[in-house]
Image (cartoon, rainbow, N blue to C red):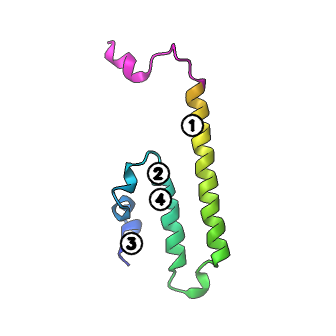
Amino acid sequence: MWVRSVVRDEWTAEVFDPELLRYKNIEEELVAMLQVGLACVAQEAEKRPTMAEVAKMIEDIRIEQSALEENLDRLRSSLSPSLATTEDAATNY
């Protein structure tokens, strides 16, 4: 009940282990996994996903996260190293 109330009030990060939040770009994946967990404990049993559905949801989260990381890596590598970063540009003013 506490987790549901925290999620409803959009304090989602409160339910995560602070050690997990040290990893970069993980919060989105944690929120998605939290949603899977909440679906698994739905008050009405017939609304709960089957284990096969849960496995598929988790697999989809991992695939989506991998694709996002891949796109970010490609974007970073495509940037010209001769261009100043926003931070570098700001310190030169």
Tell me the CA gap for discs 2 and 4: 6 Å
| Circle 2 residue | 26
The residue pinned by badge 1 equals 72
| Residues packed near mark 2 inside 10 Å, few (<14), some (14 to 19) or many (20 plus) | few
Can residue 10 be seen here? The reply is no
Identify the magenta region: 78-93
In-front residue for pair 90/59: 59
Image quarter (top left, top right, bottom left or bottom right) of the N terminus: bottom left
Q: Amino acid at mark 2?
A: Ile
Q: Is residue 89 left or right of residue 56?
A: left
Secondary structure beneath disc 2?
loop
Picture quadrant of residue 6: bottom left
The kind of residue tagged 1 is: Leu
Which residue lies at the image location 56% right of the left edge and 22% below the top edge?
79
Query: Residue 67: image x %, image y %?
Result: 63, 46
User: Percent position (x, y) of residue 80?
Assistant: 56, 18
Asked if marks 2 and 1 touch (Cβ < 8 Å), the reply is no
The residue singled out by tag 3 in the image is: 3
Looking at the image, which is closer to me, 20 or 3? Answer: 20
Mark 2 or mark 3: whose residue is earlier in sequence = 3
In the picture shown, does residue 40 fall above or below 70? below
Q: Earlier in the sequence, mark 2 or mark 1?
A: 2
Spatial distance from mark 3 to mark 4, Cα to Cα?
13 Å
Q: CA gap, disc 2 to disc 1?
A: 14 Å
- Vertical comparison of 30 with 80: above or below: below
Identify the amino acid type marked 3.
Val
Number of marks present in the image shown? 4
Is residue 87 shown above or below 46? above
